[in-house]
Amino acid sequence: MRVIVFGASGMIGHGALRACLRDDAVTEVLAVVRTPLDVAHPKLRQIVHADFTDYTAIQDQLTGLDACFYCLGVSAVGRTEAEYTRVTYDYALAAARALIAASPNLTFVYVSGEGTDPTGRSRQMWARVKGRTENDLRALPMTAYMFRPGFIQPVDGAVSRTSLYRRLYRATAVVHPLLKRLFPQHISTTDAVGRAMLVASRPGSNAPAVLRNPDINDLATARR
């Protein structure tokens, strides 16, 4: 199984990359990055690429892939709708279209978020943009899964790139074991998200098209 990962330097991308590198069924992992990752592994190949709206220059490297774990994203805090749309919508659709052309049988796993609004009526800008992104990805001729995680605890060295989130995770780290016992199906980890992506991308997974934390945790448990 050959997997391509976008956003491997981020918190959830770290979990996805780690899960792939640890899975014997994954033979190669391509990480599309702007800056090389400080990771070395026999299965990992990094593709340094600058323009995430145009993949013409690396199109020949995108063939023969079985799955894409699209974890690239930014916080909407402090960004205009146009800025957020470019990173969230434009980048994702450009990647999906390039991958369909090069690897038409590929399964696309997109990391969205709890609260995403596919109807376009939400007052939350990020929810509308994420919803539009989900809708247009699902309309493309490919198998696609929308991951909508809620609270995700970073583990195994995963670190959020958003300072506000880093403070939140530090504040909740002490009580995370208690929260996990009280609400086992509504709190997940970066490791569980990565393992669930692998399960969803395999033929015959029977995973729902839209997965929230309970679905993600169920798939991650099934993988063990």
Image: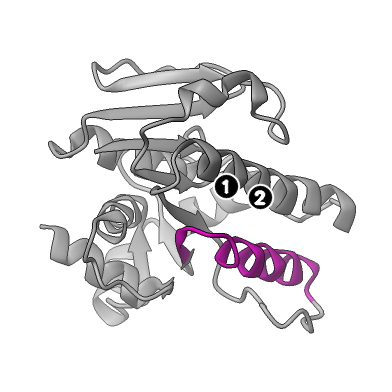
* Rendered residue at 71%/31% (across/down): 54
Of residues 54 and 6, the one nearer the viewer is: 54
Cβ–Cβ under 8 Å for marks 1 and 2: yes
Amino acid at the residue labelled 1: Ala
Q: Nearer the viewer, residue 77 or 214?
A: 214
Residue 135 lies in the magenta-colored region: yes
Magenta-drawn segment: 124-146
Is residue 98 covered in magenta? no
Based on the displayed image, in which of its 4 quarters is residue 172 positioned? Answer: bottom left
Between residues 166 and 136, which one lies in front from this camera angle?
136
Spot occupied by residue 224 in the image (x, y as percentages of width and height):
10, 57
Residue 37 in view of the camera: no
Which SS class for mark 1?
helix
Instruction: Point out which mark residue 93 bears.
Output: 2
- Quadrant of the image containing the N terminus: top left
Number of callouts in the render?
2
Residue 44, position in %: x, y?
32, 22
